[in-house]
Amino acid sequence: MGLVSGRERGLSAALARAGLSILSVIYRIGLAVVNLRLRLPGGVRRIARPVLSIGNLTVGGTGKTPMTALAARLVTEAGGRPVIVSRGYAAPPGGKNEEARELERLAPGVPVVHGRDRWQAIHDWMWRRPCDVAILDDGFQHRRLARDLDVVLVDATRPFGYGHLLPRGLLRELPAALVRADFVVITRADLVEPAALADLKERVRRSLARGAQILTAEHRPTAVLDAGGKIGPPDVLRGETIAAACGIGNPEAFRATLERLGARIALWEVFPDHWAYSREDVGRLAEAARSAGLKWLVTTRKDFVKWEPILPDQGDRSAVRLAALEVEMAVVEGEDVLRRAVQALLPGQPKDAAAPLSGTGPMGSA
């Protein structure tokens, strides 16, 4: 991360970034080819159900999983029957990846299906089981499937992937692609200063189509969990000196959340995104925390679903409490507009239900 962010200095880092810039040009050419193919007849296919896409511009964690769960809840509360469809990246053969397992927990009762060809996955599902709305998890770049509502997340702490396309930066597409979005949700808005948030909104607004909405959201800690259930509210970490580790797309945002809770992080380790933890990994982390005299080893809920099957035995856990910080997505600006737009996808709903409410959220311009 230090290389693409520019924090790493020196001749070798500069040469590496130059090489990555060349690869970014090739990546950009590939994007242009894909866009041309999508304009050909049959390039985009429509399914016989409304499709709601949750996605982003960058690689890494912007909050897609909790936002997808929130979208499923909005559909359910409106009386609809959602199904969540994801590609299943890094899922074991015949199994589910950590996002799918986390979605099943965050959206109980909502089916989660995998498929590289998501059109086929939805098609196969809806002919066998009821489905009113298909929700695409990480779907903004999956443009072969037509969608009725595009929700794109932008992380306030790292909004535009250091300003470069992959692999020089973290952008999957340039910010101009936001013209396809119906809603842009700025996540982790509480982790930046108000002036920085206002500036980010203005930058986003310049890329939006007329009528698109900018919403803001926060990742709110709700509980601290262990393998047996809840330990307590997030405040149990206030004033505690802890060890923390994670393998997610935006680890610094997790660290900032812990520090805002009042936890003091004495040991900190970051693994690559989607890391397949081994028993040795978790045991080593727990032993490091124990040796440092710490009582807590905390990770994200997404990491913890991979830790649970390989946790050290009870004796080890009594010395160091291995726990996950549970968070939920809270849309703090514009949730009513999003709710109406989701309701409008359901059968029998008036299609003007998604019209913007006066004074709710800033409007984009072409």
Image (cartoon, rainbow, N blue to C red):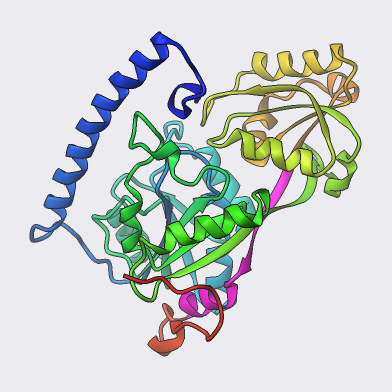
Residue 337 belongs to the span the image colors magenta: yes
Looking at the picture, how far across and down is residue 7, in whole percent?
52, 23
Q: Residue at x 24, y 34 (%)?
A: 27
| Residue at position x 63%, y 34% in the image | 252
Indicate whether 300 appears above or below 204: above
> Is 42 positioned to the left or the right of 13 in the image?
left
- Judged left or right of residue 307, residue 364 is left
- In the image, what residue occupies the spot 35% across and 60% down? 207
Front residue (pair 47, 287): 287
**Quick check: 311 above or below 12?**
below
How many callouts does the rendering have? 0
Which residue shows up at 53% across the image and 25% down it?
272
Quadrant where the C terminus is found in the figure: bottom left
Q: Is residue 12 visible?
A: yes
In the rendered image, the vertical position of residue 313 relative to residue 68, given as above or below? above
Q: Which residues are magenta?
A: 325-343
**Rendered position, 300 above or below 41:** above
Q: Between residues 132 and 297, which one lies in front from this camera angle?
A: 297
| Residue 349 shows in the view | no
x and y, in percent, of residue 69 in the image: 57, 58
**Residue 179's spot in the image, x, y percent?**
32, 62
